Image (tube, helix red, strand yellow):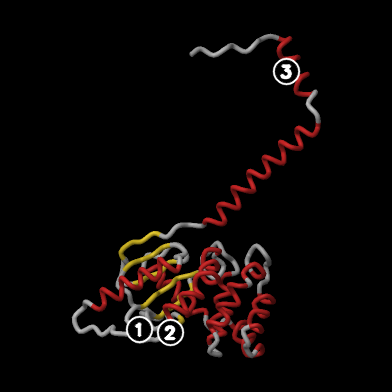
Amino acid sequence: MAQKKAPSGRKSSVRTARNASSRPLGFYLILGAITAAGVGGLAYTALKSGPSTTVADAPVPLTPGSGTARGYMLGDSSAAVQIVEFADFECPSCARFATITEPDVRTRIIETGLANLTYFDFPLPQHSNSQPASNAAACADDQGKFWAMHDQIYARQHEWSTYATKNPKGSLRAAAQAAGLDLRAWEECYDSRRHQARIDANAAEAGSRGVNSTPTFFIGGKMYTGAMTYDEMKAAVDTARAAAAGAPGSDTGR
């Protein structure tokens, strides 16, 4: 269908300009508010939804702690299934997993002996304060409190992240205090960067396994990219346990 042609010429242009200028100020205020709300809604949706989990065969054998890399284990070291996590302390998706999903994983999977969890820090270059956070957590491990510090760091991510400060030490020190650390010993370790070699080795381990985003999990020979839900992780653990139970000489009757 042919469209009706718009009127042309100088009179039409003047009429259009006059009509536009006669609109009340409130019209533009309302239009601006609608536009801002739309942009804000899109931003909120993008932040809320986050990346979905993808699954692939693990590109290399699952060997926690291989070479000079040393992760931080939680749970029974003899558990039939190992959950290996590579995460960045400044990664929002990692924080979402640590603060929302991981509490259920700990109580219903780790503490019941279905699996153990080993955390490898993988500081990403775009997160300037992730290295200091890894340093802070490694120093907490000297006092047997890595996981307490891990929880505090993620819970306070908004206080010490790159977007919040250029000098995260004060906020990380507050996290160390909340985790119950000896602050003098922690600060001496933090300032000396005593565990930088371990942090670098853990990052290298991530690279050797083909990890290029956080969080990434390895469970039963599968690589899971993205912040897993509890149900997704439980299903992956159950599948890995079933596979282990069918292996010759296996003993997973717990």
Q: Marks 3 and 1: CB-CB under 8 Å?
A: no
**Residue found at x 68% / y 71%:** 167
Q: Position of residue 199 (x, y in %)?
A: 49, 77
Q: Marks 1 and 2: CB-CB under 8 Å?
A: yes
Residue at numbered disc 3 = 16
Residue 92 picture quarter:
bottom right
Q: Earlier in the sequence, mark 3 or mark 1?
A: 3
Identify the secondary structure beneath mark 3: helix
**Residue found at x 46% / y 66%:** 215
**Residue found at x 56% / y 90%:** 143
Q: Amino acid at mark 1?
A: Ala
Identify the secondary structure beneath mark 1: loop
Q: Position of residue 254 (x, y in %)?
A: 32, 85
Q: Is residue 238 left or right of residue 194?
A: left
**Residue found at x 62% / y 88%:** 181
Q: Which mark is residue 75?
A: 2
Residue at numbered disc 1 = 79
Q: Residues within 10 Å of mark 2 (few under 14, many from 20)?
A: some
Q: Amino acid at mark 2?
A: Gly
Between the residue at mark 1 and the residue at mark 2, the CA separation in whole angstroms equals 8 Å
Q: Amino acid at mark 3?
A: Thr
Q: Earlier in the sequence, mark 2 or mark 3?
A: 3
